[in-house]
């Protein structure tokens, strides 16, 4: 391994593998989960940990672009791979929507839980948080602000030109945005940090939230539910700290309900590692056209050759549509819906978006799925309360 980062990374790993039983690891074929699998396999084979063997768990669907890559990793590491189909275990069904809170992936996680019980595994590794700490950004052009704050004007110009070419936007736009963010917060400029790259934003921004509900809860004000402590970070790192803040405040690292009996652990969220990487200059982690720059230098020797050239991975868009469309069609036949009756969403907008989803048109599906999930969760909770009341009466 070519930098001092990789040995540091491997030394922190045994804390995630404190078990004398088999270890399960989520493997999507992306760089994060593949790094987790390869490093865990490396430590197990060197007998640096007590765990006897590693088994990967992958989720498959028709025409998935990830499947060739996670099979490469399985063969490279010479480990058993368990493949769970999203057709047999959808990401969401009418009855599998979570218990304590609305949650997707319940059927898949239930199948994963059954695998863990059958194998006697007590540890489940994920690649979660790798995108954030390893600098997987398409647009991280605010790095230019670091040079501007230090009055390195020539360097700032070179960096802005590189990002301009990569993003295909005028260099003036890159420089102006970096200059605006580099000004002191007291001037009121440091409020335009973008958490998500524009290339990943949905074409539709419809939310269907009822105006009264938005006003009552403050949801009409962007980011009002989250703390703004990240604003104290240097401008070139605000996006990173903003994402980390939301990750923690949403408790995204907690195990799903079906997997709560396992040590559900995220090596890329290991606090010393996160603290270290948050101090690494942004341009070391990611450059124009070079996301995960440090990661590729430090960990690529662990990966199979075909994985080293991978630049992106598939998302769960197709499995989500497969699961959601039948539910959308069923909702269109309903006269009453919980989310409408409770004043959460506007009926006309919601029905319009359901029709668009059912026919394959753009509908801001990522946000719409949350409303659908909430609708069936509320129904499920209502049925559970009714059943409990009937049992008590009997």
Image: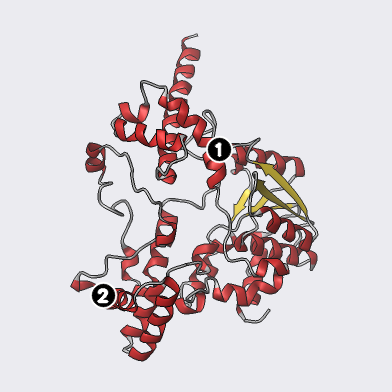
Whole-percent x and y of residue 87?
A: 64, 37
Looking at the picture, tell me which residue is in the foreground, 377 or 390.
377
CB within 8 Å, label 1 to label 2: no
Model colouring = secondary structure
Quadrant for residue 88, please give it: top right
At label 2, counting other C-alpha atoms closer than 10 Å, the crowd grade (few under 14, some 14-19, many 20 or more) is some
Quadrant for residue 118, please give it: top right
Q: Which mark is residue 350?
A: none
Whole-percent x and y of residue 59?
A: 65, 47
Lateral position of residue 86 relative to residue 213, left or right: right
Asked if residue 322 is positioned above or below residue 7 in the image, the reply reads above
What residue lies at 45% left-to-right and 18% top-to-bottom?
A: 386
Whole-percent x and y of residue 304?
A: 73, 67
**Residues under labels 1 and 2: Cα distance?**
44 Å
Mark 1, residue position: 322
Quadrant for residue 185, please give it: bottom left
> In terms of secondary structure, where does tag 1 sit?
helix
Mark 2, residue position: 180
């Amino acid at each position: 391994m070519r930098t001092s980062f990789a040995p540091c990374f491997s030394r922190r790993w045994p804390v995630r593998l404190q078990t004398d039983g088999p270890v399960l690891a989520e493997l999507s074929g992306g760089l994060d989960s593949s790094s987790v699998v390869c490093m865990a396999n490396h430590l197990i084979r060197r007998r640096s940990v007590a765990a006897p063997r590693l088994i990967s768990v992958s989720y498959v669907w028709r025409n998935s672009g990830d499947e060739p890559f996670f099979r490469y990793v399985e063969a490279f590491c010479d480990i058993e791979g368990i493949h769970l189909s999203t057709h047999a275990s959808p990401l969401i069904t009418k009855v599998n929507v979570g218990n304590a809170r609305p949650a997707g992936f319940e059927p898949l996680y239930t199948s994963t839980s059954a695998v863990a019980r059958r194998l006697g595994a007590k540890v489940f590794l994920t690649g979660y948080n790798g995108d954030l700490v390893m600098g997987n950004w398409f647009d991280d052009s605010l790095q230019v602000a670091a040079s501007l704050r230090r009055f390195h004007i020539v360097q700032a110009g070179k960096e802005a030109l590189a990002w301009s070419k990569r993003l295909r936007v005028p260099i003036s736009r890159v420089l102006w945005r970096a200059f605006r963010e580099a000004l002191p917060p007291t001037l009121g400029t440091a409020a335009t940090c973008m958490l998500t790259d524009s290339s990943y934003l949905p074409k539709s921004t419809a939310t269907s939230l009822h105006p009264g509900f938005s006003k009552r809860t403050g949801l009409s004000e962007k980011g009002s539910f989250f703390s703004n402590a990240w604003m104290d970070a240097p401008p070139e790192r605000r996006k990173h700290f903003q994402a980390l803040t939301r990750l923690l405040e949403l408790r995204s690292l907690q195990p799903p309900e079906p997997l709560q009996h396992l040590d559900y652990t995220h090596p890329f969220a290991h606090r010393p590692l996160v603290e270290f990487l948050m101090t690494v200059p942004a341009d070391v982690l990611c450059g124009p056209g070079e996301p995960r720059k440090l990661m590729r230098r430090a960990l690529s020797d662990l990966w199979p050759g075909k994985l080293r050239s991978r630049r992106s991975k598939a998302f769960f868009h197709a499995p989500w549509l497969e699961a959601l469309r039948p539910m959308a069609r069923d909702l269109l036949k309903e006269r009453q819906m919980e989310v409408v009756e409770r004043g959460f969403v506007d009926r006309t907008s919601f029905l319009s978006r359901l029709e668009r989803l059912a026919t394959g048109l753009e509908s801001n599906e990522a946000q719409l799925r949350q409303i659908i999930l909430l609708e069936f969760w509320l129904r499920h909770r209502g049925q559970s309360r009714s059943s409990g009341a009937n049992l008590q009466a009997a």
